[in-house]
Image (cartoon, grey):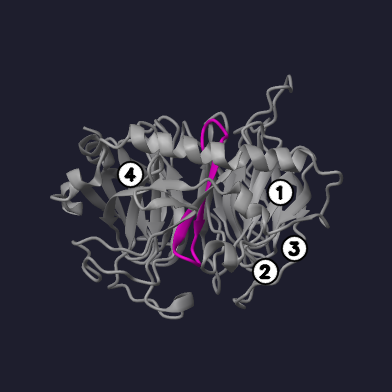
Amino acid sequence: MKQQILILALAMYSCVAGASANDLNAFNTKDFFKTALPTGCQPKGARVAPDGRYLYLAEMCGKIDPKTKKRVPTASIYDLEKMTLSKTLITPVGMRKGILANTEVDFSYDGKWALIARAEGDSGSEIYKDQGLVTVVNAQTQKIAKYIPVFGQGAKIIATRPVLSRIRNPQQIIYVANYFSDDISVLDITNMKDDGTLKGDSYFVKKIDLNSHFKPPVNHGYKIAPRGIAFSPDGKYALVLATETGSLFIVDSIEHKQVAELAPIGKETAGRDLNLRHIVTSRDGSFAYLSHMRGNAVSRIDLRKLMQIVEALPEKGPNVVLPATLWQDLFVPFATAAGPKNILVLEDYPKDHPNFPNKKWPLAHQNTIVLDPVQNRYLYVSARTTSTEGDTEVNSKIMGKVDIIDTQNGAVVFTLVGGAQPTALDITPDGKTLISGALIGSKLFIYDVGKLIGIYEK
């Protein structure tokens, strides 16, 4: 099987040999830069609406209310046709001495609802004290319809389960990763109504407690810190990434139970220490792409093979551990010009980078990744680019980057200079416009990647 995948990858490489990053050597980021838009404090998560018209942005420490002169938690909506701010939503206060506001955004399966995660809460929270919540926005009216409690702390990544085709009346199930309380909140918004009642307790289903058999190699104060979530295309399983331990949880997303934990990637396998940060899957369900913030890299695994292994397990549950050696069987190497590579290390910076022109930087820290929605060929990889290990100090003068990877040949097509600590990242449904949020710089950087890819593929 492994040999067949490698042969296929090499065949794909030969088919696209005409496409070359050399065609882009004469260009700089400014040639593809469209505009920059101001945001609230610390834009953390972004998602383009399914129709491609609007971008919803979660702002972690909000904006100053011009009337009261006080900081309020916010999420902003941008009109991507006019390239302007369309609306700012004021959401419930989280913690004044913690994360005030919002972290991530996703949309319901039917596209009717935008879902915005408030990370945490305390006794002073406006609603649902001592926990995170999800603000539900009616995507048609762009008004807040509901607040749903998550009964966990550190609500960050939101993921929408694919609709199960075998069910006559399909549910719309939402998973929320709680970074601080090490669990997953399950929401069911199938019968969501914008009826004037904001409290949405009835939409909370349960929490999935995550049980890890591994300890973090570095103590950041967290045990597991679940982060990225992706579902198998049939909606039967969820893959949950443990940022701290580096392990991968497989969850039965029908029964909402942990069924196995895949051990962290061993240093002997990768040649460097890696954790798991974000995950995206290909449309046909063949591959899952992973970002490794610890390790400055991305990788690709055979998702179908992993699902087959899980299905065949003689027993399933929180005590089932899949060995680290399995990673070697799951990796689908990138067929690069230098030979097949399981791990793509992305520490090189472009010639127009203001801090590291044509240099390597060991603190690239790849985080958010998105796959182009049209061909599923190009992987966009945001690199936060920090000045010190562990973000113990923040230097707003150091800019990040966004690498564009051709997954068919493993080439870095182009590297865009980003803002300070780029984190929020998404692309329009037509694959032409890329949006990157500077976490520290409080700006959106918008790029014409349709033009860039057109030059590459000509």
Q: Which residue is mark 4?
A: 434
What kind of element bears circle 4? strand
Instruction: Note whether residue 60 is visible.
Output: yes
The mark closer to the camera, 1 or 4, is: 1
Specify whether residue 354 is painted magenta: no
The N terminus - image quarter: top right
Residue at numbered disc 2: 123
Residue 45 can be seen, yes or no: no
Q: Which residue is mark 3?
A: 212
In three-dimensional space, the C-alpha distance between marks 1 and 3, rounded to whole angstroms, equals 11 Å
Across the whole image, how many numbered discs are drawn on residues?
A: 4
Answer left or right for 149 relative to 338: right
Read off the magenta span. 282-298
Tell me which amino acid carries mark 2: Ser
Q: According to the image, label 1 marks what residue?
A: 250
Q: Are marks 2 and 4 in contact (CB under 8 Å)?
A: no
Mark toward the start of the polypeptide (1 vs 4): 1
Which mark is nearer the camera, 4 or 3?
A: 3
Tell me the crowding category of disc 3: few under 14, some 14 to 19, or many 20 or more residues within 10 angstroms, Cα based.
many
**Which mark is on residue 7?**
none
Q: Amino acid at mark 1?
A: Ile
The label nearer to you, 3 versus 2, is: 3
Alpha-carbon span between mark 3 and mark 2? 30 Å
373 displayed left or right of 81: right
**Left or right for 212, reference 67:** right
